[in-house]
Amino acid sequence: MRDEQHHKRWNEIKTNDSWAIFKIMGEFVNGYEKLSRIGPCVSIFGSARTKPDNKYYKLAEEIAAKIVDHGYGVITGGGPGIMEAGNKGAHIAGGTSVGLNIELPFEQHDNPYIDSDKSLDFDYFFVRKVMFVKYSQGFVVMPGGFGTLDELFEAITLIQTNKIEKFPIILVGTEFWGGLIDWIHETLLTRFNNISAKDLDLIHVVDSPEEVIDILDAFYKKYRLSPNF
């Protein structure tokens, strides 16, 4: 009897997995249809826990406004903290403000600064991550946690393996990122030779909005500013 129940339960799991394919397809289709119309954008990442009085919240807001002033829209994860700051800066500056929300048991909720027709909700992290990479002209990465690091290293890996076109990756906050970059150079590159020096060519560490814009503009002087999809 126990074997029959186990077999029945296993069949139910397999059936549910198969039907999940259609939900995944739906998220991809909805994302592609909406984001294919947004034009050139830069994604801003960072902690959902960053409060509005934090210097990095204010810096993210200022960076987003300058990004808009220079002809790009802004994409964030759609939630609070740094994500809210990015959408707020873009919104106040009158630019495109996109939010790619994910349903989480804590921290995540829509912020009020996303364009009403550019707010998307996802159940699957991997679908959401595809949207960030596919529809971004660059990544601006503020201090954050595991999710921020996940997005950063995924982008580096995809560029390193030539799975996506190169775009600038800009880390904001020397005090936050300096130790990680030192470890990458000294341990990954020099000591263990696990990466190539050229893998780090597109990673920049800066502290000001002006430096972010200078890097974006310098990179896209080589290319016509247009969506990379």
Image (cartoon, rainbow, N blue to C red):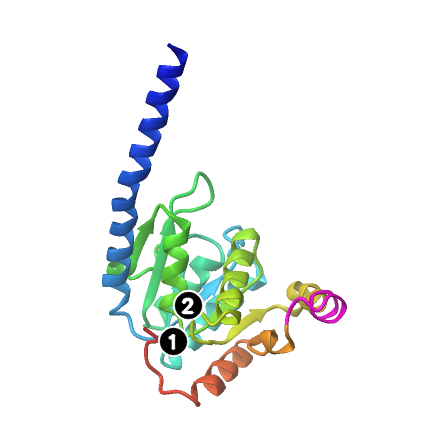
| SS label for mark 2 | helix
Q: Nearer the viewer, residue 108 or 57?
A: 108
In the current view of this chain or complex, which residue is farthest to the right?
Answer: 191
Q: The disc labelled 2 sits on which kind of residue?
A: Gly
215 lies above or below 140? below
- Residue 149: horizontal and vertical position, in percent? 56, 58
Seen at 39% across and 19% down, the residue is 6
| Label 2 – label 1 distance at C-alpha | 8 Å
Q: Is residue 181 visible?
A: yes
Amino acid type indicated by mark 1: Val
Tell me if residue 72 is in the magenta stretch: no
Residue 113, quarter of picture:
bottom left
**Mark 1 sits on what residue?**
68
Q: Position of residue 215 (x, y in %)?
A: 52, 82
Task: Give the numbered dot on residue 183.
Answer: none
Write the residue at 44% across / 64% down: 86
Q: Nearer the viewer, residue 184 or 112?
A: 184
